[in-house]
Amino acid sequence: MTVAPDAPDLRTDFPITKKMIYMNNGAVAPTPLAVVKATTDFMVKCADEGPDAQATSDYITLLLKELRTRVAHLINCEPEEVVLTQSTTEGINIVANGISWQKGDTIIARGGKHEHPANYLPWLRLSQQRGMVLKELAIDENGFFDLDELEKAARKSRLVTMSHALYNTGAIMPLEEVGRITEENNALFCVDAAQTAGTIRIDVKKIGCHFMAFPGFKWLCGPMGMGILYCSKKAAEMLEPPSIGGESAMVSGNNSSIIAIRGMPHRLQTGFRNYPGAAGLEAALRYILRVGIDNIRSANMKVAEALRQELGRIEGVTLHGPQDVSKRTSIVTFSVPKDPSMIVRKLEEESGTVLAEREVAGGRKIIRAAPHFFNTEAQAATIAAQIKALLLQ
Ligand SMILES: Cc1ncc(COP(=O)(O)O)c(C=O)c1O
């Protein structure tokens, strides 16, 4: 069952909405009270019943099962394909460092240094230290690339990596087309879904990717330091575990030199996990799935469109990102004729409005607003008025 996203009770789940305008959800989103409660309840349970008592241990097993099932619903995968990480960055590094590369293997990255650093630096390092070839696809001002160029480059490539939506312009990449190209060319496909998990529909089967990394603490509204790596069962076999220990492997039989590595998802996770964080992320996923991704998408886009319209009326403000609304997320990126970092700082200091400064292709500094379903069109109008006033100062 879904909940209407504009129902006022949803905003009461986010105490921050009473105090300030927080529209920096593309960086870290606030958690709803249900997440605060789930994390605290977990800690209280450990303190009351013993963190390593059998009852707590059984509870953790169940909790992780629930968490994996909810991620499976979110992205249409199997629960065993869900690996717990601390962030998108960690997930991408598990992939980049886990594949048994051959010298000269080609990796294709969209936009090179215009990808998010989390999805560029691990591949750049491979090319610099291990002799892989990093092919960087040319991009236009919104971050789109030419599918024909990809098609040609993919013929000789081992892996293609790409953001689902871009952190700076919000442009949504044509992942299903990319998945078709990688499949036809027998290449691996790695997706950075940091800016889409929790804000638009994701179906890893339709996309045809082998790996997808995302955080729990942006659009999913979970606790900081929790992330997910989706790794298809088949592709998991290709990854050397990043670390090894009691939870992921064991010494097998009488011959103590044989190490038996467990199956998915354990093979890619070692040691105790951040279980309080897992309790929070499980509650966040329950919350987000109950609100409904389609409801979230339409609520977010309403605020984004209101903000674009209001900003578009201010002299000197330039909006970035694709014109076609179906090709962008709720991220609203714009430049101003004054120092953007000064504007972002003053907005927070003087009005309690939180946006972010980022940059677009070509190095131009921009301001980024990233509205989520608890933001409102009225807040969009207020932000525009605040910016107009700062530009007139
Ligand atoms: C597209 C993209 N990828 C990766 C990251 C890094 O995410 P994390 O903090 O989960 O490593 C971000 C953070 O803003 C991002 O926008």
Image (spheres, rainbow, N blue to C red):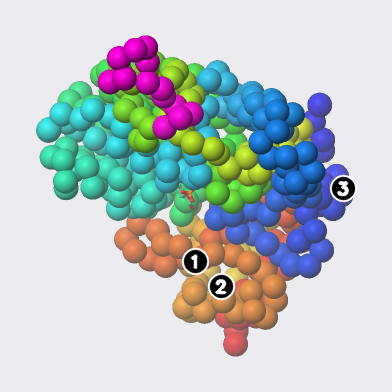
Where is residue 22 drawn, in percent x and y?
Answer: 68, 62
Give how far apart the Cα atoms at labels 3 and 2 are: 29 Å
Mark 3 vs mark 2: which is more N-terminal? Answer: 3
Q: Can see residue 176? A: no
SS assignment at label 3: helix
Query: Crowding at label 2, few (<14), some or many (≥20) Cα neighbours within 10 Å?
Result: some
Please provide the residue range marked out in magenta: 245-257
Residue named by callout 1: 357
Residue named by callout 2: 344
The image's mark for residue 9 is 3
Q: Residue furthest bottom?
A: 393
Residue pictured at 77% horizontal, 39% vertical: 49
Query: Crowding at label 1, few (<14), some or many (≥20) Cα neighbours within 10 Å?
Result: many
SS assignment at label 1: strand
Query: Crowding at label 3, few (<14), some or many (≥20) Cα neighbours within 10 Å?
Result: few
Residue pictured at 70% horizontal, 51% vertical: 31
The amino acid at mark 2 is Val
The amino acid at mark 1 is Glu
Tell me the quarter of the picture where residue 183 sits. Answer: top left
Residue closest to the eye, 280 or 385: 280
Residue closest to the eye, 354 or 223: 223
